Image (tube, rainbow, N blue to C red):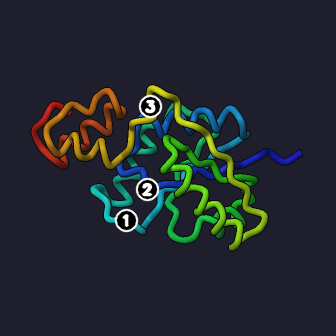
Amino acid sequence: MADRLALYAGTFDPVTHGHLDILRRALALFDRVTVAVAAGGKQTLFTLDERLALVRACTADLERCVVMPLPGLLVDEVRRSGAVAVVRGIRSLGDYHHEWSMEAMNRALSPECETVFLLARQELAMLSSSLVREVARLGGDVAPFVPAAVAGALRGRLGGGRT
């Protein structure tokens, strides 16, 4: 039997403890997980290369996990890689509505594209990359929310603060 590959796609600008929790839980369900870091779509604080490096640094201890850029449509990468599922994390009802629409579009583009939703753990549900960036931008301590490498990168990019 072939191993089951899942894709976990996102901007990861920056990667948070919430992202990493979803990834670890996906690794418990699938044989391999590829973290696909979106190349475009949103204006980001970190470049694609910086985001790839940060995600790689934060996942170096995870076996069966590969990090790669996602330059185009997720469904194209699902087909190319032979992935059996796309993993998405859901923190709130608002996330669910957004992810539901994305799942419907992906399925319309590629009927074989299956999506698995993992609910955020309660203690991590408030985490989002945009909130972490805002806290860092305003000089707050983001250390409880992101790995040390990410906190350092935020400090380097935004200066000062208690990151």
Image position, residue 55 (x, y; %): 43, 45
**Which residue, given by chain and number where applicable, does mark 3 sit on?**
124
Residue at left offset 16%, top offset 31%: 162
Image position, residue 141 (x, y; %): 21, 31
Whole-angstrom CA distance, mark 1 to mark 2, is: 8 Å
Q: Looking at the picture, which amino acid does disc 3 mark?
A: Leu
- Left or right of 3 on screen, residue 26: left
Whole-angstrom CA distance, mark 2 to mark 3, is: 18 Å
Q: Looking at the picture, which amino acid does disc 2 mark?
A: Thr
Residue at left offset 73%, top offset 56%: 114
Image position, residue 21 (x, y; %): 52, 33
**Which residue, given by chain and number where applicable, does mark 1 sit on?**
42
- Position above or below: 63 against 8: above
- Left or right of 25 on screen, residue 163: left
Please give the label number shown on residue 11. Answer: 2
Residue reaching furthest left?
160
Label 1 CA crowd tier, 10 Å (few <14, some 14–19, many 20+): few
Please give the label number shown on residue 99. Answer: none
Q: Dot 3 lies on which element?
A: helix
Q: Looking at the picture, which amino acid does disc 1 mark?
A: Lys
